[in-house]
Image: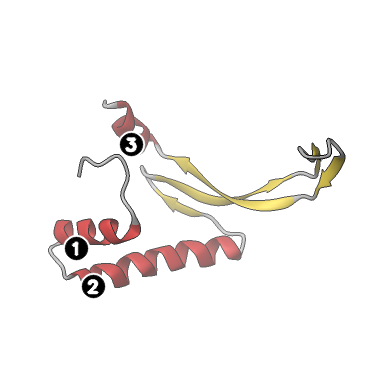
Amino acid sequence: MSKESINKTEFISAVAERAGITKSDAQKTVNAVLDIITETLQNQGRVVLTGFGTFEVREAKERVGVNPRTREKVTIPKTKRPAFSAGAELKKAVKGE
């Protein structure tokens, strides 16, 4: 796979081909993985895939921003965001090592 980016449908097709399974089975598998990651993060948990990376929830503090139209200062409330930290093996692969 040498494309610059792929969408979910292309990803599912690639999983099916690599794993030697049907696209239907690959779609069920990919959706199950994404559902598990989503549910774990909703419950404030972490998903650690050793060597690949970690999915977790990070809190962003309340901060002051500026409305670009009016230049008025506005308070941006604190929030929670999903985050991904790449693992050592993924970092090496991206670097070409």
Q: Nearer the viewer, mark 3 or mark 2?
A: 2
Lower sequence index among marks 3 and 1: 1
Tag 3–tag 1 contact (CB < 8 Å) = no
Judge left or right: residue 72 versus residue 39.
right
Q: Kindly identify the amino acid type of the residue bearing the numbered disc 2.
A: Asp
Residue 55 in the image: state x and y as whole percent. Answer: 50, 51
Q: Kindly identify the amino acid type of the residue bearing the numbered disc 3.
A: Glu
Seen at 36% across and 42% down, the residue is 51
Task: State which quarter of the image contains the N terminus.
Answer: top left
Seen at 15% across and 68% down, the residue is 21
Seen at 37% across and 33% down, the residue is 91
| Mark 1: few/some/many CA within 10 Å (<14, 14-19, 20+) | some
What label does residue 25 carry, if any? 2
Image quadrant assignment for residue 24:
bottom left
Tag 1–tag 2 contact (CB < 8 Å) = yes
Q: Kindly identify the amino acid type of the residue bearing the numbered disc 1.
A: Ala
Tag 3–tag 2 contact (CB < 8 Å) = no
Residue 38 in the image: state x and y as whole percent. Answer: 51, 63
Residue that mark 1 sits on: 16
Identify the residue at the far front of this view. Answer: 69
Q: Circle 1 — which element? A: helix
The residue lying toward the viewer, choosing from 77 and 38, is: 77
Q: How far apart are marks 3 and 1 (CA)?
A: 23 Å
| Mark 2: few/some/many CA within 10 Å (<14, 14-19, 20+) | some
Q: Distance between the residues labelled 1 and 2?
A: 7 Å
Q: Circle 2 — which element? A: helix
What label does residue 89 carry, if any? 3
